[in-house]
Image (cartoon, helix red, strand yellow):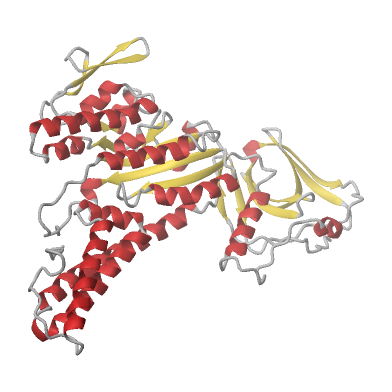
Amino acid sequence: MHIRKASWLNLAVIGLFTAATTTVIVSAPLLPVLQDDGNTEDIVYMANGRILHGQILEETRDTIVFEYRNDKLGITTKMVLKKQNISKMDQDVAMATSSVQPDAVAENKPKFDSNSTSTVKPGYLDELKNKYEARLASEDLNLPRVYMVPMEGQMGTDVHISFYRSIVDDIRAMNPDLIVFHLDCSDIDDGMMMNQGFRIAMGELELEPGIQDLDQYGLLIDLFRDDLRDIPQIMWVKDSVGVSSVVALAWPDFYMHPDATLAGLDKIWAQAAEFGDDQVSAKMIAAWSAAAKAFLEYGGVPLVIGDAMLDPSKTLMASWRGRDVIWSLDGQGVYMVDGSETATARFTARVAENLCLTRGSAETLDDLMLLHGYREYQLLPGAADSEYKDYVKNWRRSFEGATTALEDYQQHMSWATGNDTLRYLGRAKSDLAKVLSAIKHYDAVKVRFEQIGLSEYRLQTLIMSLKERIKILRQNDRGGGGADGPPGRGAGGGGPGRGR
């Protein structure tokens, strides 16, 4: 009969890790460390050389449920092991008596006090405790540790460097063996495109330079490929239509979902045409093309592919010299990749793989890890996924609130006449203050409003103009109101138009 004594550590629920050959289950609360009065244990010898000590809890025809024990760390972990991966099993083996008692070991273990009166943010200690215990639970399993980083939604807002800077420290703390970027950005399917609905009715609308956005994506790539260059990285694309395609191609280890598409760089070309002036458009096209192709060069992609994906007039063909793919824009080759002179080149996963543009196609993370050489792996419980969802939800909610405030501003300006002038000018000023607050809080909101011509500087100018007008009205009429203001567009020569 086994008598169990409580160890220093009861792990919280930290997940279910499934691999091709081994499943690791950490449940809450775990059974405490086994201390056998009879001084016996079961030993499992794995085919890969690992030796596991603990107790066999259950056995079927194909698997065993094994309670792995680590006296050094003071933990137990349930594991489902496939018999095909086991060399042999020894049961009821006499245990060597340790001179270090479990309770004595516990005295030297780090302690996490969730009831601490520290001024750290609520829940931080629990979060740190879970991350630490997750690391301990797999410390001796020798499985490669994988950290997933989502890049999903809308480029420039959902995918913005301001968020990714915040998770670099978390990646460093988790110390993964591999970072996987999961990219799913299809502008044509996004309900919150940059050019949606309303425009600013404040004179001539200036076009967004565009090259600034490419600069931002360059900083994003530098953040991971340079600052975390000591950690191997994979780009895994579910879909990419638009500028996300050049971002994806900046990673040499590049994979796609089987139904993925890589396309949409013609948007850079089309945006340049909006300048109207042929000479200006030509200069912008040259600048943007050079910036976009710099991403491809970083990923080791032939620049002719960038030409074909950017310029609708270019055709693209491929041929082979041994195992090497030779790309051509002059119509010379044996395989037509893009024969249209009115559309840019696009790649399906199958074509990209056949032409060695990617390293393969993977439908699931398990498939991806197997292609990369990992038959077993551990998916780390990093902060990126949950925090990314919160970030996207929060900035979009802030943007919606700001657009409502912008509509309210125009309405209040139209009502700021006669005896109601002072009252509605004050409300209009408050509306613009809400928009300014959202822009300062989220870079993504700032990007969206700059796309429609409303910069932080423009907002501040409008607010200052309203303040001056309100000040003059109050000096002329201490009772509030009285002075007629110009109807409609109001402060400082016109304001934002309405509608989305």
Q: Which of 365 and 292 is in front in this view?
A: 292
Image quarter where the C terminus lies is bottom left
Image quarter where the N terminus lies is bottom right
Give the residue displayed 30% in from the left and 36% down from the top: 245
Q: Residue 488: where, in percent of width, then height?
A: 8, 71
Q: Can residue 130 be seen in this view?
A: yes
Q: Which quadrant would residue 437 be assigned to in this image?
A: bottom left
Give the residue displayed 11% in from the left and 41% down from the top: 274
Residue 273 lies, with reference to residue 168, above or below; the image says: above
Q: Which of 253 and 420 is in front in this view?
A: 420
In the rendered structure, the answer to whether residue 40 lies left or right of residue 144 reads right
Q: Residue 343: where, in percent of width, then height?
A: 14, 31
Residue 300 lies, with reference to residue 119, above or below; the image says: above
Residue 310 lies, with reference to residue 120, above or below; the image says: above
In the rendered structure, the answer to whether residue 173 lies left or right of residue 345 reads right
Give the residue displayed 26% in from the left and 21% down from the top: 304
Q: Is residue 59 visible?
A: no
Give the residue displayed 32% in from the left and 60% down from the top: 439
Q: Residue 466: where, in percent of width, then height?
A: 21, 71
For this orientation, the residue located farthest to the front is 475
Q: Nearer the viewer, residue 280 or 289?
A: 280
In the rendered structure, the answer to whether residue 51 lies left or right of residue 215 reads right
